[in-house]
Image (cartoon, coloured by chain):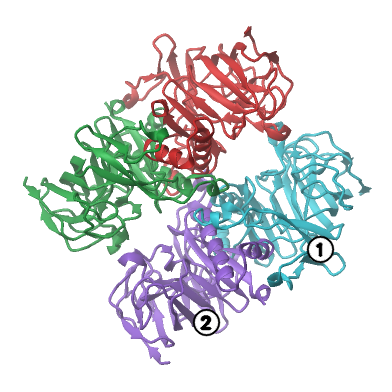
Chain colours: A green, B red, C cyan, D purple
Amino acid sequence: MTIHQFSPSVYYNTIGSHEPVLKIQDGDTVVTTAVDYGGMDSSGKVVAKPPNPMTGPFYVEGARPGDILAVHLEHIYPNRNWGYTTNVIAPNVLDPAFISQLPASETIRWNVNLEQGVAQLTDPSPALSNLKLSLGPFMGCFGVAPSDGQAISTATSGPYGGNMDYRGFVTGVTAYFPVFAKGALLHVGDGHAVQGDGEIVGTGIEISLDISFTVKVLKDKTIYWPRGESQSHIFTVGNARPLDQAVQHATTEMVRWLHDDYGLSMIEASNLLGQCVEYDLGNMFDPAYTMVCKLKKEFLA
Amino acid sequence: MTIHQFSPSVYYNTIGSHEPVLKIQDGDTVVTTAVDYGGMDSSGKVVAKPPNPMTGPFYVEGARPGDILAVHLEHIYPNRNWGYTTNVIAPNVLDPAFISQLPASETIRWNVNLEQGVAQLTDPSPALSNLKLSLGPFMGCFGVAPSDGQAISTATSGPYGGNMDYRGFVTGVTAYFPVFAKGALLHVGDGHAVQGDGEIVGTGIEISLDISFTVKVLKDKTIYWPRGESQSHIFTVGNARPLDQAVQHATTEMVRWLHDDYGLSMIEASNLLGQCVEYDLGNMFDPAYTMVCKLKKEFLA
Amino acid sequence: MTIHQFSPSVYYNTIGSHEPVLKIQDGDTVVTTAVDYGGMDSSGKVVAKPPNPMTGPFYVEGARPGDILAVHLEHIYPNRNWGYTTNVIAPNVLDPAFISQLPASETIRWNVNLEQGVAQLTDPSPALSNLKLSLGPFMGCFGVAPSDGQAISTATSGPYGGNMDYRGFVTGVTAYFPVFAKGALLHVGDGHAVQGDGEIVGTGIEISLDISFTVKVLKDKTIYWPRGESQSHIFTVGNARPLDQAVQHATTEMVRWLHDDYGLSMIEASNLLGQCVEYDLGNMFDPAYTMVCKLKKEFLA
Amino acid sequence: MTIHQFSPSVYYNTIGSHEPVLKIQDGDTVVTTAVDYGGMDSSGKVVAKPPNPMTGPFYVEGARPGDILAVHLEHIYPNRNWGYTTNVIAPNVLDPAFISQLPASETIRWNVNLEQGVAQLTDPSPALSNLKLSLGPFMGCFGVAPSDGQAISTATSGPYGGNMDYRGFVTGVTAYFPVFAKGALLHVGDGHAVQGDGEIVGTGIEISLDISFTVKVLKDKTIYWPRGESQSHIFTVGNARPLDQAVQHATTEMVRWLHDDYGLSMIEASNLLGQCVEYDLGNMFDPAYTMVCKLKKEFLA
């Protein structure tokens, strides 16, 4: 169980079977950083190009296609005191006939107080001058190399994870990814200090991150979509367009999980989910949308 | 401010410009009941036919097209000690290639303890024998007569409300509907004792209800989709297929609300919603799906 | 086999269980007219209000729920020498981010030469001054009363037909509708002199029509969506949003048809359709979109 | 203008910035072959693995990001006398509640008579024993390296082309792709001898091909989606899910084309397309669906 201090110097804009930046063992922890969406680091210096330059990939010894890579998020927190968002709701989230009523989008800046854990507009209009948001820092984009040697833009997502922009991937959560390539090849990055459901302006408060995570390989266990576990819930993640299909992926994956690991029949899983399931809208902005299917762990006791 | 005790004897399976069962004044309260989805009343007697027989319509004096009808839900609670659900997740919520792995759906029964406020499967398999769910009683289907003299099945929903199956319409919430017909013609019913997000088995725990509500007419104020207000949130409701379009309707309606009533510019509304918005999946089963766009009232202070 | 000359004086903007304007026998022919989308008749006089005022309903003796009403289109042709369209592509047919580049829509006029069978812009810009379109006159909106006593706006469509805006419903075609109400209650109207696939500007060349049709009741035969037969093809019509669902309805209905009436197994139907099926995009503008699944009759010999 | 005879020995299952197999000049012609979906060549020998192993990439000298690569399909024809299909309609093309009525899918064989230009089931059931289909050979999957150094599975498609499975890409057609990588890096393959609209069984009649094509670089001309030109039509191709979005991409690209190259205003393009546009359903099976927007060239004179 080694703790690796890793300082990135190369960044990829695709998630794929790139040359690993570090080889680690099952059980190891990595302490590292990630630049923001636009490639700016903790000092605000541009060291990579958009979109979402990734730290990694990390090669996990022993991980093989057909395994699961568990990534426990030990610590995900901004490492600078400002971020930025766009300032207009994205066209695909609005009625087509209403879109023309919104102005063109610009980038605006937010102050991020790391000690108090709050964000505020740097230059608010009077109506929003009291707006003070609690931080909920997470990684918008992370995942493992996709199947078939693909290298896919960090603008989008899929069964391998990627740009899910789901605000549930916070400190303390464990994410599970299907392994498609030898060594899994984990990529991490795309810090958001705060974000609403759906990432409807097309950004969270984009910011560079301190990241530490611990990996674990679960051998010979096939999953089809990312899964996660928080203090309170288990959850599954569907990445696709339209939202309907994202829900279908997430729900099917949850049924599989309840069936395979918790021993529920299809009917038992249906009875439980039917009256207890929750859904989160991860993002409705990226090329693939993200819907999350959640179940409180208290129902699994 | 009269309180009307109303005992229904006629039930409609469409929401439309039917003969009113009662005329009430702006500000009045109605205390009534509703049978369940299948037409069974508090004693379990079948007194109407499915789907979702409605109590009403109630004609509200003074309500005219172009107004809003506000319906404050004073009390929504089951009036019998059992309900029923189907027991298999609906095909449209699952991956098409996975559907064949589920058995045919049957109706099963739940015990509903009105005093303790919990529901349990009447005849659980061992794996679910400890499942005890807190009640969250709400109306699955309610709304006002739709535009243009239409009469639309209580299986579906639209700008006028209808079968939204959103579990947020509980006691204490105020719902707002656009008025399309003289007198608004409010219909209420379709009790659910408990339901998960999305109504993914196609039912909540279907049950007959005691209902009391108070109406208020907001003159000359146009809204396009149902709105609501709870203790903690304001929310807007989009009813359409696919989910993407339901999100578009709900989000656009929320932007209109923030702009027209709270005086925010499009950019201010975007900045606020972008980092603070929440979405609920009302239903992904009915002919029209339902997505709800929510904002915490604390952000509007 | 009576031929009825019927001159409409009442028009409905919903398709529903309205009082019949005429009772006819199985096998009868009706010769009538329809006003255009906006309610203008052959002389350009406004005699009804939008959208799509219907001629009818015609009550067909002997038609009962569970039967099919076959409507053979004997003659569908404009009865005046001008029509109109809107002049901007509808927002829902364009990329959301591109919509703002189009101006607001206006109504423009077309000359329709009934003898030569061509349409031309009344006031063309130079670039379109040579544009001369062959007429393809059809009914955009027609169908039978929907299920459960519903009355549904002529802006939309469903299993009962309605505003399908499919340019295949021309003279010589037979349309088949499932009967939901006693007497079927056929409504006809919404003339289009010309239209592209998808009705992407939201109109065809809107025009009043001469219409004659012959009805036939096919007893005790259940279909789920409108069907049709032309000289060359059989076809099925799915009306829903999104297009994916419209395709699903149309394809499923075609499989049922091949199975039930042509005796093909599911595999035979698949082999045939897989390599021979054609699809038409009826409309992608109305609340329900329309996709048509077609098969050449030569493959059924 | 060299004619290159190229015999492939390496095959890629992604379209990406792979090492070129051949460098050619602007204006050159390549005469080559492609194996089928499963990697079988003209002799039926498996020489590559599924899905859709590509011949290429071909590096076109002078092609740079921001250019267009025009690919004129000189000759696309099967080079063996048999192919194969699956034999059950894909679940995503059917109503979710109907899917369970179809059996599991198997692969079946077709005889392909190259001289007569017809295909017949090798082992037909009696009902399909007379089925004789005219060949319409085309490439299901071809395109150029995608943006940002991505390498994307030949199972799907995008702005760069890929697995569009559109049966319009036949001999005589010119396809246009946006160039994203130096040399464009053209990949070709995935022969279909026959296919219905939509590729609804998930395959055409899969077959190996003789292919010859001529490339041309159009400098400094940006397009966003593949375009094409046949004897009769110009067309644009949208690849996305759901179909609605594919239509949006294709229509927007057609409007851009009419505006930029034919000098039509947005209103002129709308008037023309509104009454004259046609759409083809390329595929509704692959991860990205394909819709094609077409306009008869006679309207552009």
Quadrant where the N terminus of chain D is found in the figure: bottom left
Please report, as a chain letter, where disc 1 is located.
Answer: C
Q: How far apart are marks 1 and 2 (CA)?
A: 50 Å
- D78 versus C26 height, above or below: below
Total tally of numbered discs in the picture = 2
Residue found 65% across the figure and 52% down from its top: C237
Residue found 66% across the figure and 44% down from its top: C158
- C110 versus B62 height, above or below: below
As rendered, which of D71 and D273 lies closer to the eye?
Answer: D273
Instruction: Write down the residue under mark 2.
Output: D114
Quadrant where the C terminus of chain D is found in the figure: bottom right
Mark 1 closeness class: few <14, some 14–19, many ≥20 residues within 10 Å: some
The amino acid marked with disc number 1 is: Asn
Query: Is disc 1 placed on a helix, strand or loop?
Result: strand
- B298 versus A238 height, above or below: above
Q: Does residue D196 appear in the picture of this structure?
A: no
- D273 versus A126 height, above or below: below
Q: In which quarter of the image is residue A40?
A: bottom left
Instruction: Write down the residue under mark 1.
Output: C111
Which of discs 1 and 2 lies nearer the camera? The answer is: 1
Which residue reaches farthest left? A2
As rendered, which of A121 and A242 lies closer to the eye?
Answer: A121
As rendered, which of C39 and D222 lies closer to the eye?
Answer: D222
As rendered, which of A150 and B132 lies closer to the eye?
Answer: A150
Residue D53, given in percent of the width and then of the height, sits at 36, 71
Please report, as a chain letter, where disc 2 is located.
Answer: D
Which numbered dot is residue C197?
Answer: none
The amino acid marked with disc number 2 is: Leu
Relative side of B165 to D277, left or right: left
Residue B38, given in percent of the width and then of the height, sits at 58, 23
